Each structure stands twice: as structure tokens, then as C-alpha cells.
Image (cartoon, rainbow, N blue to C red):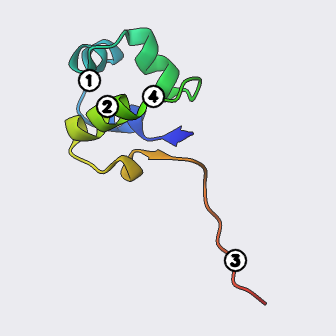
Amino acid sequence: MRNRLKVLRAERNWSQADLAEKLDVSRQSVNAIETGKYDPSLPLAFKIATLFGLPIEQIFSAHDVVVQAAE
């Protein structure tokens, strides 16, 4: 799963530790989510979305979608 977590965190000048504290998870968990090694649980994804004030879909995506016109 792709995500914009690192970008959103950097825009606020938060370290991984800062974000981890706000989410009540470990810094290692934040790192694993940012690098795509771990997909957050749905409750954690909602918590992240609420913290950033964005819909989940603007933070996480299953993959890049390529739409091609039918020939």
C-alpha cells in the first residue's frame, strides 16, 4: 500500500517520534508504515486521517491506478 505519510509529516516539521507520540504507536511503527513494510489497521488509518484532517483515500492508496481509454 502506498501512502503520503512521510510527506504529510515533513510538511508539519514532525519527526517520526513526534508522529508516533501523537498516534500512540512506536517510532518503528511509523517508519514501517512510511516505508510500506506495514499497513496500518483500519482504526489506526482513521486516527492518522483524523490527525491530518484528510480522508483516508488522500493518505493511503492500494496502488497507482492507470486508466486507459477503451479502443
Tell me, yes or no, whether the two marked residues, 2 and 1, touch with CB atoms within 8 Å.
yes
Q: Residues within 10 Å of mark 2 (few under 14, many from 20)?
A: some
Q: Which mark is drawn over residue 52?
A: none
What's under tag 3, amino acid-wise? Gln
* Marked residue nearer the N-terminal end (1 or 4): 1
What's under tag 1, amino acid-wise? Trp
What SS does tag 2 mark? Answer: helix
Q: Residues within 10 Å of mark 3 (few under 14, many from 20)?
A: few
Q: CA distance from mark 2 to mark 1?
A: 5 Å
How many tags in the picture?
4
Give the residue at mark 4: 40
Q: Which mark is drawn over residue 14?
A: 1
From the viewer's perspective, is 41 left or right of 53?
right
Position of 70 relative to 2 (above/below): below
What SS does tag 3 mark? Answer: loop
Q: CA distance from mark 3 to mark 2?
A: 33 Å
What SS does tag 4 mark? Answer: loop
From the viewer's perspective, is 55 left or right of 61?
left
Give the residue at mark 3: 68
Which mark's residue is nearer the viewer, 4 or 2? Answer: 4
Which mark's residue is nearer the viewer, 3 or 2? Answer: 3
Q: CA distance from mark 3 to mark 4?
A: 30 Å
Tell me, yes or no, whether the two marked residues, 1 and 3, touch with CB atoms within 8 Å.
no
Give the residue at mark 2: 9
Q: CA distance from mark 1 to mark 3?
A: 38 Å
What's under tag 2, amino acid-wise? Arg
What's under tag 4, amino acid-wise? Pro
Residue at the (20%, 45%) spot, across then down: 53
From the viewer's perspective, is 22 left or right of 62?
left
Which mark's residue is nearer the viewer, 3 or 4? Answer: 4
Q: Position of residue 41 (x, y in %)?
A: 43, 29
Q: Position of residue 62 (x, y in %)?
A: 57, 47
